[in-house]
Image (cartoon, grey):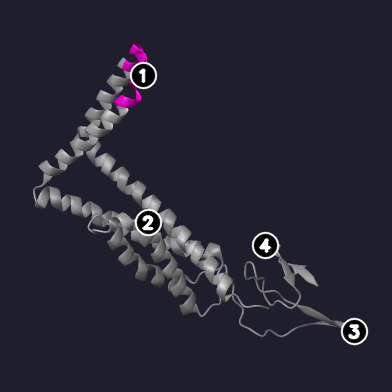
Amino acid sequence: MEATCTRCHQPILAENCYCPACGLPQLLYATDALLGQATPEPWDEAVRDAASVDWKAGLRASLLLAIPAGLLSSGLSPVAFFGLFWMAAAASWAVVLYVRGQRAHWITAGAGARIGLVTGLLAAWLAFALSGSALFVERYLFHQSSQIDSEWQTRVSFGQQMAEQFTAGLAPPDAAQAQAARAQFQAWMLSPEGHAGMEAFRFAFDGCVLLFFAVIGGALAARLLARTRRPEL
Protein backbone atom coordinates (compact mmCIF):
# COMPACT_ATOMS: atom_id res chain seq x y z
CA MET A 1 0.00 0.00 0.00
CA GLU A 2 1.32 3.42 -0.93
CA ALA A 3 0.45 6.88 0.35
CA THR A 4 1.42 10.34 -0.87
CA CYS A 5 3.62 12.81 0.97
CA THR A 6 1.77 15.98 1.92
CA ARG A 7 4.82 18.13 1.11
CA CYS A 8 6.36 16.81 -2.13
CA HIS A 9 3.51 14.45 -3.22
CA GLN A 10 5.91 11.58 -3.82
CA PRO A 11 4.70 7.99 -3.23
CA ILE A 12 5.49 6.56 0.21
CA LEU A 13 5.31 2.95 1.31
CA ALA A 14 3.06 2.20 4.25
CA GLU A 15 5.98 1.03 6.42
CA ASN A 16 8.06 4.22 5.87
CA CYS A 17 8.35 6.47 8.91
CA TYR A 18 9.30 9.51 6.81
CA CYS A 19 9.27 10.57 3.17
CA PRO A 20 12.35 9.20 1.33
CA ALA A 21 12.28 12.22 -1.01
CA CYS A 22 12.04 15.24 1.31
CA GLY A 23 12.37 13.70 4.81
CA LEU A 24 8.98 14.84 6.12
CA PRO A 25 7.87 12.60 9.05
CA GLN A 26 4.82 10.49 8.23
CA LEU A 27 2.28 9.48 10.86
CA LEU A 28 1.04 5.94 10.20
CA TYR A 29 -2.18 4.63 11.71
CA ALA A 30 -3.30 1.05 11.99
CA THR A 31 -7.00 0.24 12.34
CA ASP A 32 -7.87 -2.22 15.04
CA ALA A 33 -10.81 -4.24 13.77
CA LEU A 34 -11.80 -5.40 17.25
CA LEU A 35 -11.86 -2.02 18.97
CA GLY A 36 -12.83 0.00 15.90
CA GLN A 37 -10.30 2.68 16.81
CA ALA A 38 -7.18 3.98 15.03
CA THR A 39 -4.01 3.96 17.11
CA PRO A 40 -0.72 5.49 15.98
CA GLU A 41 2.20 3.15 15.50
CA PRO A 42 5.20 3.91 17.74
CA TRP A 43 8.20 5.66 16.24
CA ASP A 44 11.35 3.55 15.94
CA GLU A 45 13.73 6.45 15.08
CA ALA A 46 14.28 10.15 15.79
CA VAL A 47 12.21 12.60 13.79
CA ARG A 48 14.37 14.67 11.46
CA ASP A 49 13.57 16.86 8.49
CA ALA A 50 16.21 16.16 5.83
CA ALA A 51 15.31 19.35 3.97
CA SER A 52 16.11 21.66 6.90
CA VAL A 53 19.56 22.93 7.94
CA ASP A 54 20.80 23.54 11.47
CA TRP A 55 22.61 26.78 10.61
CA LYS A 56 24.68 26.85 13.76
CA ALA A 57 26.41 23.67 12.66
CA GLY A 58 26.10 24.60 8.98
CA LEU A 59 27.89 27.93 9.41
CA ARG A 60 30.64 26.28 11.39
CA ALA A 61 31.27 23.75 8.62
CA SER A 62 31.00 26.40 5.91
CA LEU A 63 33.43 28.77 7.61
CA LEU A 64 35.94 25.99 8.20
CA LEU A 65 36.13 25.21 4.47
CA ALA A 66 35.50 28.73 3.12
CA ILE A 67 38.73 30.15 4.55
CA PRO A 68 41.15 27.84 2.68
CA ALA A 69 38.98 27.97 -0.46
CA GLY A 70 39.02 31.78 -0.42
CA LEU A 71 42.78 31.87 0.09
CA LEU A 72 43.44 29.42 -2.74
CA SER A 73 41.07 31.28 -5.10
CA SER A 74 42.41 34.79 -4.42
CA GLY A 75 44.97 36.71 -6.44
CA LEU A 76 47.57 35.96 -3.76
CA SER A 77 47.50 32.25 -4.54
CA PRO A 78 49.70 30.73 -7.28
CA VAL A 79 46.97 28.13 -7.88
CA ALA A 80 44.08 30.60 -8.18
CA PHE A 81 43.52 29.27 -11.71
CA PHE A 82 41.89 26.21 -10.10
CA GLY A 83 39.49 28.40 -8.10
CA LEU A 84 36.41 26.65 -9.51
CA PHE A 85 37.73 23.31 -8.25
CA TRP A 86 38.62 24.71 -4.82
CA MET A 87 35.17 26.23 -4.42
CA ALA A 88 33.26 23.11 -5.46
CA ALA A 89 35.46 20.92 -3.26
CA ALA A 90 35.04 23.22 -0.25
CA ALA A 91 31.25 23.23 -0.58
CA SER A 92 31.19 19.43 -0.94
CA TRP A 93 33.34 18.90 2.15
CA ALA A 94 31.24 21.38 4.11
CA VAL A 95 28.16 19.26 3.37
CA VAL A 96 30.01 16.08 4.37
CA LEU A 97 31.18 17.64 7.66
CA TYR A 98 27.69 18.92 8.38
CA VAL A 99 26.08 15.52 7.81
CA ARG A 100 28.69 13.77 9.96
CA GLY A 101 28.37 16.32 12.72
CA GLN A 102 24.58 16.03 12.77
CA ARG A 103 24.75 12.23 12.71
CA ALA A 104 22.25 12.33 9.90
CA HIS A 105 21.84 9.63 7.28
CA TRP A 106 21.38 12.15 4.47
CA ILE A 107 20.08 15.60 3.53
CA THR A 108 18.26 16.77 0.44
CA ALA A 109 20.02 18.33 -2.54
CA GLY A 110 18.31 21.65 -1.72
CA ALA A 111 19.75 21.66 1.80
CA GLY A 112 23.18 20.82 0.38
CA ALA A 113 22.87 23.64 -2.16
CA ARG A 114 22.10 26.13 0.63
CA ILE A 115 25.16 25.03 2.60
CA GLY A 116 27.20 25.36 -0.60
CA LEU A 117 25.74 28.82 -1.19
CA VAL A 118 26.85 30.03 2.24
CA THR A 119 30.28 28.45 1.78
CA GLY A 120 30.62 30.13 -1.62
CA LEU A 121 29.55 33.53 -0.29
CA LEU A 122 32.12 33.43 2.50
CA ALA A 123 34.91 32.14 0.27
CA ALA A 124 34.14 34.49 -2.65
CA TRP A 125 34.02 37.50 -0.30
CA LEU A 126 37.40 36.50 1.17
CA ALA A 127 38.92 35.99 -2.30
CA PHE A 128 37.54 39.36 -3.46
CA ALA A 129 38.89 41.17 -0.39
CA LEU A 130 42.33 39.58 -0.64
CA SER A 131 42.65 40.22 -4.38
CA GLY A 132 41.60 43.85 -4.03
CA SER A 133 43.92 44.38 -1.10
CA ALA A 134 46.82 42.87 -3.06
CA LEU A 135 46.27 45.30 -5.93
CA PHE A 136 46.11 48.24 -3.51
CA VAL A 137 49.35 47.20 -1.81
CA GLU A 138 51.16 46.69 -5.12
CA ARG A 139 50.09 50.08 -6.48
CA TYR A 140 50.46 52.35 -3.47
CA LEU A 141 52.87 50.63 -1.08
CA PHE A 142 55.22 48.89 -3.51
CA HIS A 143 54.89 51.69 -6.10
CA GLN A 144 54.20 49.37 -9.03
CA SER A 145 51.54 51.57 -10.59
CA SER A 146 53.52 52.07 -13.81
CA GLN A 147 53.87 48.33 -14.35
CA ILE A 148 50.20 47.72 -13.58
CA ASP A 149 49.10 50.49 -15.96
CA SER A 150 51.43 49.17 -18.68
CA GLU A 151 49.94 45.69 -18.42
CA TRP A 152 46.44 47.17 -18.51
CA GLN A 153 47.23 49.18 -21.64
CA THR A 154 48.50 46.03 -23.33
CA ARG A 155 45.27 44.23 -22.54
CA VAL A 156 43.16 47.13 -23.78
CA SER A 157 45.18 47.34 -27.01
CA PHE A 158 44.72 43.63 -27.61
CA GLY A 159 40.98 43.99 -27.12
CA GLN A 160 40.96 46.92 -29.53
CA GLN A 161 42.70 44.84 -32.20
CA MET A 162 40.18 42.02 -31.76
CA ALA A 163 37.31 44.49 -32.15
CA GLU A 164 38.85 45.91 -35.32
CA GLN A 165 39.01 42.44 -36.85
CA PHE A 166 35.32 41.85 -36.14
CA THR A 167 34.29 45.17 -37.72
CA ALA A 168 36.67 45.01 -40.70
CA GLY A 169 33.92 43.95 -43.12
CA LEU A 170 31.48 46.77 -42.34
CA ALA A 171 30.46 49.41 -44.88
CA PRO A 172 32.37 52.75 -44.71
CA PRO A 173 29.67 54.69 -42.79
CA ASP A 174 29.21 51.88 -40.27
CA ALA A 175 32.96 51.33 -40.03
CA ALA A 176 33.53 55.01 -39.21
CA GLN A 177 30.89 54.92 -36.49
CA ALA A 178 32.35 51.71 -35.07
CA GLN A 179 35.84 53.22 -35.06
CA ALA A 180 34.63 56.30 -33.22
CA ALA A 181 32.82 54.15 -30.65
CA ARG A 182 35.92 52.01 -30.15
CA ALA A 183 38.11 55.08 -29.68
CA GLN A 184 35.71 56.50 -27.10
CA PHE A 185 35.47 53.20 -25.25
CA GLN A 186 39.25 52.75 -25.31
CA ALA A 187 39.73 56.23 -23.84
CA TRP A 188 37.36 55.35 -21.00
CA MET A 189 39.08 52.01 -20.42
CA LEU A 190 42.48 53.71 -20.10
CA SER A 191 41.16 56.25 -17.59
CA PRO A 192 41.53 55.54 -13.84
CA GLU A 193 37.77 55.25 -13.50
CA GLY A 194 37.54 52.76 -16.36
CA HIS A 195 40.40 50.68 -15.04
CA ALA A 196 38.92 50.54 -11.54
CA GLY A 197 35.44 49.81 -12.88
CA MET A 198 36.63 46.94 -15.08
CA GLU A 199 38.67 45.41 -12.26
CA ALA A 200 35.66 45.59 -9.94
CA PHE A 201 33.47 44.01 -12.62
CA ARG A 202 36.03 41.24 -13.11
CA PHE A 203 36.15 40.50 -9.40
CA ALA A 204 32.35 40.47 -9.19
CA PHE A 205 32.01 38.20 -12.22
CA ASP A 206 34.62 35.79 -10.89
CA GLY A 207 32.82 35.76 -7.54
CA CYS A 208 29.51 34.87 -9.18
CA VAL A 209 31.13 32.02 -11.10
CA LEU A 210 32.77 30.71 -7.93
CA LEU A 211 29.45 30.98 -6.12
CA PHE A 212 27.70 28.97 -8.84
CA PHE A 213 30.21 26.14 -8.57
CA ALA A 214 29.91 26.16 -4.79
CA VAL A 215 26.15 25.68 -5.02
CA ILE A 216 26.60 22.86 -7.54
CA GLY A 217 29.24 21.21 -5.35
CA GLY A 218 27.02 21.33 -2.26
CA ALA A 219 24.01 19.93 -4.11
CA LEU A 220 26.02 17.11 -5.69
CA ALA A 221 27.57 16.15 -2.34
CA ALA A 222 24.15 15.96 -0.72
CA ARG A 223 22.84 13.94 -3.64
CA LEU A 224 25.68 11.42 -3.43
CA LEU A 225 25.30 11.10 0.34
CA ALA A 226 21.58 10.51 -0.09
CA ARG A 227 22.28 7.63 -2.46
CA THR A 228 24.95 5.97 -0.33
CA ARG A 229 23.69 6.59 3.21
CA ARG A 230 19.91 6.77 2.93
CA PRO A 231 18.42 3.98 5.03
CA GLU A 232 16.41 1.29 3.31
CA LEU A 233 12.95 1.13 4.84
Q: Amino acid at mark 3?
A: Ala
Q: Nearer the viewer, mark 3 or mark 2?
A: 2
Location of mark 1 (residue): 169
Disc with the residue nearer the chain's start (4 vs 2): 4
Mark 1 / mark 3, whichever is N-terminal: 3
Give the CA separation, mark 1 to mark 3. 87 Å
Q: Which mark is residue 33?
A: 3
- Mark earlier in primary sequence (3, 4): 4
Q: Quadrant of residue 107?
A: bottom right
Question: Is 42 inside the magenta-drawn segment?
Answer: no
Circle 2: residue type: Leu
Q: Residues within 10 Å of mark 4 (few under 14, many from 20)?
A: few
Q: CA distance from mark 2 to mark 1?
A: 38 Å
Element at badge 3? loop
Which disc, if any, is residue 84? 2
Rounded to the nearest angstrom, the CA distance separating label 1 from label 4 is 56 Å
- Give how far across and how far down residue 140 sits, in percent: 11, 49
Q: Nearer the viewer, mark 2 or mark 1?
A: 1
**Magenta range:** 164-175
- Gap between marks 3 and 2 measured at Cα: 61 Å
Q: Which mark sits nearer the N-terminus, 1 or 4?
A: 4
Residue type highlighted by circle 1: Gly
Residue occupying image coordinates x 28% and y 20%: 179
Q: Which class describes the residues within 10 Å of circle 2: few (<14), some (14-19), or many (20+)?
A: many
The residue where tag 4 is placed is: 8
Question: Of circles 4 and 2, which is in front?
Answer: 2
